[in-house]
Amino acid sequence: MEEKKFVVFKKEELGVKEYVKRSLGKGKISTVSIEYTPIGEKIVVSTSKPGLVIGRKGEKIEELTKFIKKRFKFDNPHIEIREIMEPLFDSQLVADDIAVALEREGSLKFKVIAYKMLQEIMRHGALGAEIVLSGKLPSERARSWRFAQGYLKKTGNPAKVVDRAMSQAQTLPGIIGIKVSILPPNAVIHDRISLSDDLKRKIQMGLNVAPEVAPVEKVAIVEKKARKAKSKKSEESDGTA
């Protein structure tokens, strides 16, 4: 019985998250989380456009709160808005933006949309990014297209710092799946090698000295080989004598 109650509880929670995203619009909401407190339920909505989500004088939030309380039978729901300061580093927002662009401009421009978004992400300082589009692009047969740039961990413990998300675009040829992975500039990577200015200066000095030292070393090696060859030749001549 407890397992069934848990499944029903999680199903209702997922329904609340999906309804909030659907009602506020694709491309505006990143994540929706529910926190249960003694005074009621707190629904935390992360968005890059808080003004559009709240509405004029909080009208949208009030309507959404009333509907959630009536439809999902919450005791005292409270919606809290958290603003995302860097939307290009949030993989869910990026995936939804690509989906909206594909639905608006058509699937034939998928390369332009993907490359443009990838360049914007890297221009703002991301360490790496990857966009994978799957579907009927551009032919009748479904296939996957991958657009990547920079450094991106795929496996191991460092891969946990990569922000990943998925979205879908409804186009005329069919549904297009979108996967986005972003490594933000503030990600902690333990195997990253950073060079100080002093070390860079020493390396540069070593590169500048190398061309002058190299010919001397080459001459020494040639002379050593010549001495060995001469001694070997003299030993052979003594033996024949």
Image (cartoon, grey):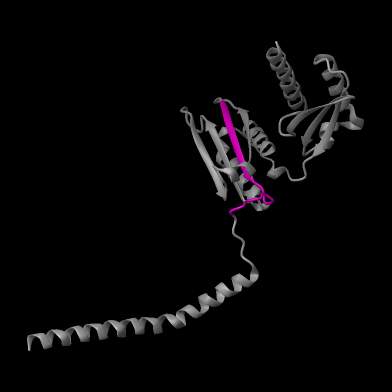
How many numbered discs, if any?
0
Residue under the image location 55 percent in, 37 percent down: 132
Left or right of 79, for residue 149: left
Q: Residue furthest front?
A: 239
Q: Quadrant of residue 177?
A: top right
Left or right of 227, for residue 87: right
Left or right of 198, for residue 85: right
Residue under the image location 57 percent in, 50 percent down: 151
Residue under the image location 52 percent in, 78 percent down: 208
Magenta-drawn segment: 175-191
**Vertical placement of residue 112 versus 100, above or below:** below
Q: Is residue 186 magenta?
A: yes
Residue under the image location 64 percent in, 67 percent down: 196
Q: Quadrant of the N terminus?
A: top right
Q: Quadrant of residue 33?
A: top right
Closer to the camera in the image, 191 or 84: 191
Residue 70 location (% of width, % of height): 84, 15
Q: Residue furthest right?
A: 57
**Vertical placement of residue 136 versus 7, above or below:** below
Residue 79 location (% of width, % of height): 85, 28
Residue 192 location (% of width, % of height): 60, 55
Q: Quadrant of the C terminus?
A: bottom left
Q: Quadrant of residue 52?
A: top right
Residue 145 location (% of width, % of height): 51, 38
Q: Residue furthest top?
A: 1
Q: Is residue 40 magenta?
A: no
Q: Residue furthest left?
A: 241
